[in-house]
Amino acid sequence: MVVLISRIIMVLLILLGVRLLARVLAPLFAPRGARLETRARRPARAMQRGEMLRDPVCGTWVDQRIAVTASCDGRTVHFCSAACRDRYLAEPPS
Ligand SMILES: [Zn+2]
């Protein structure tokens, strides 16, 4: 009986170890992990190309091509929505 229990525990530990190992190695091999990594890096990379801009009101990253814009002090400011633009124009940062 004791032998049986210890064997069950051993098998469970091995399964746990394999799962942990798979989780650690997944980003190196699995396409799912690779995609997650790409998605996480995308804002920074796009920002370097000047395509993603930060909405100064709510902090959302917006695509420059679809952003709502407003001219303020001679420069163009980008927003995620007209609501954010209106809020910004009502109270521009000093
Ligand atoms: Zn916004």
Image: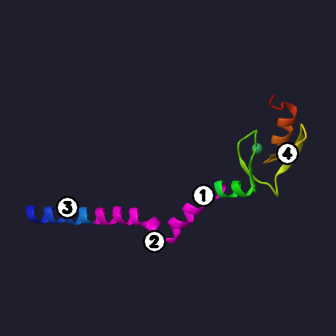
Tags 1 and 2 touching, CB below 8 Å: no
The spot of residue 15 in percent (x, y) is 28, 66
Mark 1 vs mark 3: in front: 1
Q: Quick one: which residue is furthest to the top in this view?
A: 94
Gap between marks 1 and 3 measured at Cα: 41 Å
When asked about the image quadrant of residue 45, the answer is: bottom right
The reply, left or right, for residue 37 in relation to residue 5 is: right
Q: Earlier in the sequence, mark 4 or mark 1?
A: 1
Q: Amino acid at mark 3?
A: Ile
Which secondary structure is most common in the magenta stretch? helix
- Residue holding disc 2: 29
Q: Amino acid at mark 4?
A: Ala
Q: Amino acid at mark 2?
A: Phe
- Residue holding disc 1: 41
The reply, left or right, for residue 52 in relation to residue 69 is: left
Gap between marks 4 and 1 measured at Cα: 27 Å
- Residue holding disc 3: 9
Gap between marks 3 and 2 measured at Cα: 29 Å
When asked about the image quadrant of residue 70, the answer is: top right
Q: Amino acid at mark 1?
A: Arg
Gap between marks 1 and 2 measured at Cα: 18 Å
- Residue holding disc 4: 82
For the record, the magenta segment spans 15-43
Q: Residue at x 76, y 44 (%)?
A: 55
Mark 4: secondary structure: helix
Mark 2: secondary structure: helix
Q: Quadrant of the C terminus?
A: top right
Q: How many marks?
A: 4
